[in-house]
Amino acid sequence: MDMPLKQKIFAIVLAVILLGIVFELVRRRKLKIEYSWLWILTGLSIPFLVWRYDLLLFLTNISGAVSSTSTLFAFAFFFIILLNLHFSIVISDMQNRLKYLIQENAILRQTIVELTDKKTKY
């Protein structure tokens, strides 16, 4: 069983558009390179699955899904869950860093105030 030509063309066009958007966002520095690899890998996996449709069918059979479309949706859902988990970790780390910077800033301000007060007393 082979994927219909219209579906192949549509999937490849979507992959090219995704890759174009990712490269443009990296070029404009709107997307960091460290995050772009994930999207580039996603954009390249689409034509790979079109080329190796038998692999997608194999994954569909293993997972017990009814159709290859269901398998793709399951992978997309899992991808989004992993992406959300990653960003939750990044946000938690940023919150900890921000808390530390705020505390350090408060200590430095207090030190400046204390040093300024000592100068004015003499």
Image (cartoon, rainbow, N blue to C red):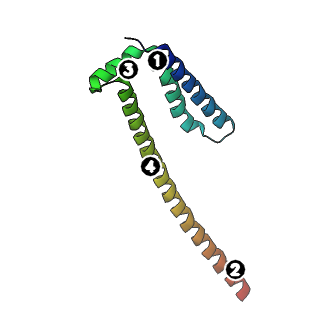
Using the rendered view, name the quadrant where residue 75 is placed.
top left
Q: CA distance from mark 1 to mark 2?
A: 69 Å
Return the x and y of residue 100 as percentages of the image width and height: 52, 62
Q: CA distance from mark 3 to mark 4?
A: 31 Å
Q: In this picture, is 115 found above or below 57?
A: below
Q: Nearer the viewer, residue 114 or 70?
A: 70
Sequence-earlier tag: 4 or 1: 1
**Secondary structure at numbered mark 3:** helix
Q: In this picture, is 118 found above or below 89?
A: below
Sequence-earlier tag: 1 or 2: 1
**Residue depicted at x 64% and y 37%:** 25
Query: Circle 2 sits on which residue?
Result: 116
Label number found at residue 90? none
Disc 1 crowd, CA 10 A, few/some/many (<14, 14-19, 20+): many
Extreme-bottom residue of the structure: 121
Q: Nearer the viewer, residue 20 or 114?
A: 20
Disc 2 crowd, CA 10 A, few/some/many (<14, 14-19, 20+): few
- Tell which tag, 3 or 2, sits nearer the viewer: 3
Return the x and y of residue 62 as percentages of the image width and height: 27, 23
**Secondary structure at numbered mark 4:** helix
Residue 93 shows in this picture: yes
Label number found at residue 89? 4
Query: Circle 3 sits on which residue?
Result: 56
Return the x and y of residue 72 as percentages of the image width and height: 40, 28
**Residue depicted at x 49% and y 52%:** 91
**Secondary structure at numbered mark 2:** helix
Amino acid type of the residue that numbered disc 2 sits on in the rendered structure: Thr
Query: Circle 1 sits on which residue?
Result: 50
**Secondary structure at numbered mark 1:** helix
